[in-house]
Image (tube, coloured by chain):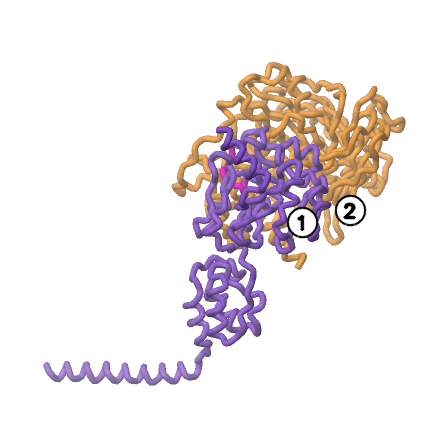
Chain colours: A orange, B purple
Amino acid sequence: MLKTFPRGGVHPPENKLTAGNPIEILPPPETVVIPVTQHLGKPAVATVNKGDKVLVGQLIARAEGFVSANIHSSVSGTVSRIDTVTDISGYKQTCIIIDVSGDEWLSDIDRSPDIITEIKHSPEEIIQKCLDCGIVGLGGATFPTHVKLKVPAGKKCNLLIINGVECEPWLTSDHRLMLEKGEEIITGARIMMRALGVTKAIIGIENNKPDAIAHLSRLLNGANDISVQGLKVKYPQGGEKQLIKALTGREVPSGGLPIDVGVVVQNAGTAYAVYEAVQKNKPLFERVVTVTGKSLSKPGNFLVRVGTPVAKLIEAAGGLPENTGKIISGGPMMGKALANLQTPVVKGTSGIVVFPAEESQRPQVGPCIRCSKCVSACPMGLEPYLLMSLAEKGLFERMKAEKVTDCIECGSCSYICPAHRPLLDYIRLGKTTLFKMMREKSVK
Amino acid sequence: MSHTILLTVIVLGSVGLAAAVILYFVSQKFKVYEDPRIDIIQEALPGANCGGCGFTGCRNFAEALVKADTLDGLNCPVGGATVMADVAKILGKEAVVSEPLVAVVRCQGSYEHRPRTSAYDGVKECRIAHLLYGGETDCHYGCLGYGDCVEACQFGAMYMDEKTGLPVVIDEKCVACGACVKACPRNIIELRKKFKKDRKIYVSCVNCDRGGPARKACKVACIACNKCFNVCKFGAITIQNNLAYIDSFKCTLCRKCVTECPTSAIVELNFPPRKAEEEAVKETLTQK
């Protein structure tokens, strides 16, 4: 019997069309648009000005405050302007726009193909390297990695989990990375183990990627510090609280963090980025993005420079199909529809999914008959139907009592609802309004 | 038989009497004094419970009025000066006349002025669309057009204009309770001073982008060119975050800024036609 998390969850059609497509390197575009906010936390502050010449890997915006991340140039060229451009948030944000000329990298980045498995750095050096290189969680939430690797005083960490679950349908970027860069991911995991001071790590992979499980197990070759664990396919297993429960049986308390049960979870892509930062001195300025959709002629996995417009990715995947209704950045469950094809790829962009018009439209909403399918599907044990009606009526304090802040926004409730009610939209409204109210209170 | 009836009457009667005596003493002991004026004032208030005064309902407002030393800062926007004068009379205090206000929608981004660049398919509520993205046009500040303000208005003073896709305030019905101001996630609606004959001059734009992008997104956007600021003699106009703002309490309705504005972002409403315009109208009439 394979392990999984016990409560809730759904199983949407997997549609992993691109699982067999090796990662292709996409050349840099003519211009890149690099937002200064690509992470959770405070925006970085631009350190370059209009007209400055920059090289690949050069720092162009510095982290502001503890929870923030450095931003590096993904191309070589000239800064043409610093302006507000619509980014993934759907709003205009400050971006650094660079005209590309050539592809000249900073000389201290190690571009050789050798894999360095020996770890020479001390935990402090590793954390500093992650901060310097602007490493953030690449699973989608983009939480700065250096913050996660620093165990807060009074807390103890005894296990690192590498998240290779990739539970979102359609996406295959982590899958391909585990197949092609397995050795590097394992080294990255060992680097993070040293930073955290733990002796044990588990790589969790869903059972729909048997080749990745076999490949990593073979590479580990019976090593006793890291183990690979296959998991039953169920969404949202990639959520850290669900993954911890599935692998260890420990339950993160309501309102708590994984560190409260002695665990830190890092994405497989992040492990690779940490490897590159620490061993190769390479900042995070490119990532693997799955570009997929049934209507695309050449879907695939691409290694893309941050700041490349989405239009370029779709071009590489065979051009925009005529009847496209929606283009989603991220997976179809948690991703966000794009309003503009010029939106740049950021550190958190794991995939671009193209849907034809007839599949993408929201179906007609019916009344709630209290069938409680959403309650059974919620992996956090909440009551989505109740939260939605509370949000509609504006009873936000009641929502707080109903633990709306525990919602991980996985969208299982909206997916399962037979009346197609927009449950998550209203729950998100409640969450944001509550957080705003709390902030206003704390200011007062 | 008659014995039973008599017994019942005596027993029940004495129980009732005992209870009455106990209740009398208990009520004396635990008596809560409530100012009788609160009830009288509540009667005098409109009873809309709209929250426009800043209190939760008319009863709360009445309590606050009785407790307050002066009526300064306390105002019922629905009842206006007449109700507040009545209240002052009941309380024997001096009425503070506050300026009447009216809600104004500061966006002219109609279908015609603001080209649509994307199509929204989600929940048709402004507060939800606002969470998701900048909206169907390139102006990420302007009206989303799903009518949360109309929904919030208890007085039927707002409606959506189908031609423009923008909300419209009916001045005669608006009581300036501020419900629409709170409902709008983009802070487009403002309570402004109500002038005679509902005359209005205001910057009908809230776009904080630089001039170029603002104009590209909407033909009638404020581009913060400073022309209105320079022409205003009364210091009513300020420019902040690429946006001009006219303080309605300083404005004298001279209309100089309106003619200066190159993008027609400043709006004048309910004025008689200007002299030059009048002549032009006459000319066209005579030509006909």
Q: Is residue B229 magenta?
A: no
Counting residues from the start of the chain, the first of labels 1 and 2 encountered is 2
Seen from the viewer's position, the closer of residues B276 and A22 is B276
Residue placed furthest toward the left: B1
Q: Which mark is residue A260?
A: 1
Identify the subunit bearing mark 2.
Answer: A
Question: Where does label 2 land, which residue?
Answer: A65
Q: Position of residue A126 (x, y in %)?
A: 82, 39
Residue B56 versus residue B200 in the image, above or below? below
Horizontal arrangement in the rendering, residue A349 relative to residue A61 (left or right): left
Quadrant that contains the N terminus of chain A = top right
Q: Which residues fall within the magenta stretch?
A: B121-128
Callout 1: helix, strand or loop?
Answer: helix
- Give yes or no for contact between labels 1 and 2 (Cβ–Cβ under 8 Å): no
| Res B104 visible | yes
Residue A66 versus residue B70 in the image, above or below? above
| Res A402 visible | no
Residue at 56% over, 17% down: A322
Closer mark to the observer between disc 1 and disc 2: 2
Quadrant that contains the C terminus of chain A = bottom right
Residue A124: quarter of image: top right
Q: Position of residue A326 (x, y in %)?
A: 56, 26
Amino acid tagged 2: Gly
Residue B129 versus residue B194 in the image, above or below? above
Residue at 44% over, 39% down: A373
Residue at 50% over, 64% down: B81
Question: Secondary structure of the magenta portion, mostly?
Answer: loop
Residue at 48% over, 73% down: B89
Residue placed furthest toward the right: A107
Callout 2: helix, strand or loop?
Answer: loop
